[in-house]
Image (cartoon, rainbow, N blue to C red):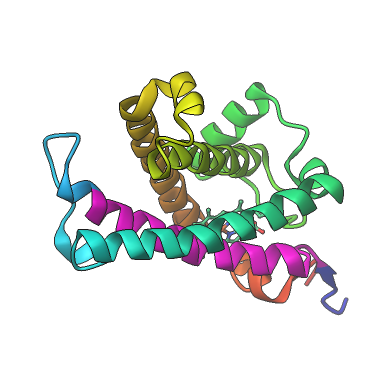
Amino acid sequence: MAPEMTKVHPLIVRIAHWLNALAVLIMITSGWKIYNADPQFDFKFPDEVALGGWLAGALQWHFAAMWLFVLNGIVYVTYGILFGHFRRKLLPISPLAVLRDVAAALRGKLGHDDLTVYNAAQRAAYLALILLLIVLVLTGLVLWKPVQFYWFGQFLGDYEGARLLHFFAMAGVGFIVVVHIIMVALVPRTFPSMFTGRVRRSA
Ligand code: HEM
């Protein structure tokens, strides 16, 4: 039978995905440089992987990428909710199914035959990423405009609480993105689909 191509990723999701990947990369690496100027913990990030050259340069990168990240995120989340993309691709999800699929993935036994459907481990990872990225924006607002968002900061443990949450959300995003990239490397035929939007259904 001739290979049949089937659509998996709408154009808007593909564009948003790659713009988001670029924005997140800039925001995380410039965030490391900002952190290095006043570390909260007993370590610094290596200067080779921290973007911006110095504190003011890193802040400029961080704030520039912030606009791309937030505007792109608004388009993606609005599309995801209004056009049923999240409901179709990321739901339903149950803790049991996530545990089962994560255990199967760790044993190298998670099937990837049908790339049109995300497994429960993927759904959990993508939902967690989206939620963590929203936490980064909300805590970031308190750090960016502490006076204007003072009222909101009170719910997050004030400026220092927001700063800690911002750091841990960054660490969570960093961890999931590393696992995400390893999974893409293990199932490489998913990679071109994030550009073309299509996968081969049957060979
Ligand atoms: C840097 C931050 C990144 C974030 C936050 C992120 C997040 C996501 C999310 C949320 C999805 C699901 C999209 C949807 O259907 O709505 C996704 C899918 C995907 N991402 Fe990423 N991603 C990132 C980086 C990357 C990178 C660097 C690669 C390539 C190595 C990559 C490759 C893919 C692929 C191939 C899929 C589709 C998976 C499939 O169809 O099974 N992503 N990503």
24 is within the stretch colored magenta: yes
In the image, residue 83 sits, relative to residue 9, either above or below, namely above
Seen at 23% across and 47% down, the residue is 35
In the image, residue 40 sits, relative to residue 130, either above or below, namely above
Residue 38, by quadrant, is top left
The x, y position of residue 119, in whole percent, is 68, 43
Is residue 117 visible to us here?
Answer: no
- Left or right, residue 169 beside residue 4: left
Q: Residue furthest front?
A: 147
Q: Quadrant of the N terminus?
A: bottom right
Seen at 44% across and 49% down, the residue is 179
- Left or right, residue 78 beside residue 136: right
> Which of the two residues, 186 or 7, is positioned nearer the viewer here?
7
Q: Assign ligand 1 to one image quadrant.
A: bottom right
The region drawn magenta spans 7-34
Seen at 61% across and 36% down, the residue is 124
The x, y position of residue 151, in whole percent, is 50, 25
